[in-house]
Amino acid sequence: MSSESRWAATENDGSSTSRDRTRKWQPRSSAGNRGRNNEDRFTSWRSFDNSTRGSQNRTNYAGARQQKSSSYQRESPDIDRMTRQMNTLSTSEVAGGMRKSTRNWDAEHRELKVGGVQDAPLISRTTDREDNVLLTSQGQHSMWHTIHDRIEKLTATYGSMTLAESGSTYQQELEQVIDLFRKLREAVFATKWANNDLAFSIQVFELSSTYCALAGNMGELLKSLKSLIVTLYPTALKAKELTGTFHLKMDPKNHSHYTALYILYHVCYTKSTAAILQLIQPGHSHPDIKFAVSIMNSILHSSYHQFFQLHQQSPWPAFTSMLNMHVPSMQELACKVMSASYYTTSIDWVKKSSSLSDVNDDTAMQLIQRWSGGRVDRVDDHRLLWFKRGKIVRS
């Protein structure tokens, strides 16, 4: 059978298969163009580019981009201004704006090597560590003698181991000594404890802790004490176990003293005992450790009577500095307890019980009124302090 006869037989066949095959070859009607006109049809991108509708779409697209760009510029005037500045900036102006450094770098390096130790920068604040004179053993001992000379001058003027009042001239001069201590401590630590000279390292950190406490510089005090308690003292004790003696010349009394100071720091300043529980062991016979534990117990049990009594019996000025950090809290506790427990009492007794004996009556009344929560009613002619009675909320 020829191809023409086969095609004719297929067209005359009434099966659905033949109808489907025939429908495939039929041209699309206007209804099948999904609403488009026949003249809008295109077969390639060239016909679309040459058509009227294609040019109209290109014009609309370009206009939309221009409108979007202009609106973005209106919303971002800073970017537009920066763009204009960058366009007007020339390479010659950039080159002309750079100036040669006037610093004498060679002289600064020589000063670090052979200059005064007081002017040497902090190890943590310089990148030229190999040129810092404090990284040498001679420089560290020179700084140590310089600090001792400054302390002797302060002692001759203000007395030995004197507490510094906030804002006083003595405190300002003491802070300068603490800055020197910080430089020396950083140098000792950077050289691995002064090249394993633990005896010298312990002396530096002990004296630094004392004067940081006298000045009330809690940040530097923590750095000194933590290095002593956590690193230096345990290392010295291990050496004692190996040799049987303190060949590092570490005084055991100093160990107990600064351990007690570390306990008081956390109890009175940070008000936390988590870091010192392992340091408090039963059987401690050193009086400084006993004093620190008694202070801790008075605070934990809210015994302001015992706290103020121990405060007056403080054995060291550095300990007193730590206790002063917690005095306001205990004074507030005392006023709250007395205002809730008594209806009337002597103002002199309240001042004595709350450690306000050195304060005049007007200032004491203001403090008591504030700490008691406004429960002070009046003070009569017999110097009796009357408290207001309020409803007691019971849980």
Image: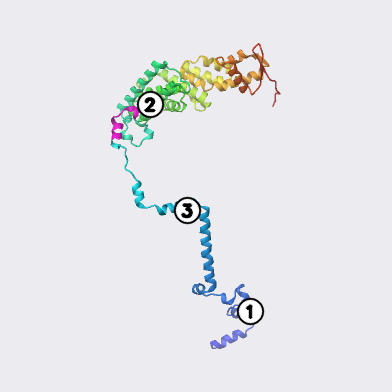
Q: Position of residue 227 (x, y in %)?
A: 42, 27
**Nearer to the camera, 29 or 366:** 366
Q: Earlier in the sequence, mark 3 or mark 2?
A: 3
Q: Is 195 left, or right, of 293 in this rendering?
A: left
Q: Nearer the viewer, residue 350 or 283?
A: 350
Image point (38%, 30%), residue name: 186
Is residue 44 left or right of 16 when viewed as pictured?
A: left
Nearest the camera: 136 or 125? 125
What numbered label is drawn on residue 16?
1
Q: Is residue 157 above or below residue 34?
A: above
Label 3 SS: helix
Is 115 one of the magenta-colored residues?
yes
Asked whether, in this view, residue 242 is left or right of residue 344, the answer is: left
Residue that badge 3 annotates: 80
- Position of the N terminus, as image quadrant, is bottom right
Real-space CA distance between mark 1 and mark 3, rounded to the nearest whole angstrom: 68 Å
Magenta region, residue range: 107-119
* Residue 86 locus on image (x, y percent): 42, 52
Quadrant in which residue 192 is drawn: top left
| Prevailing secondary structure class for the magenta stretch in the rendered image | helix
Residue to which mark 2 is pinned: 180
What amino acid type is highlighted by mark number 1? Ser
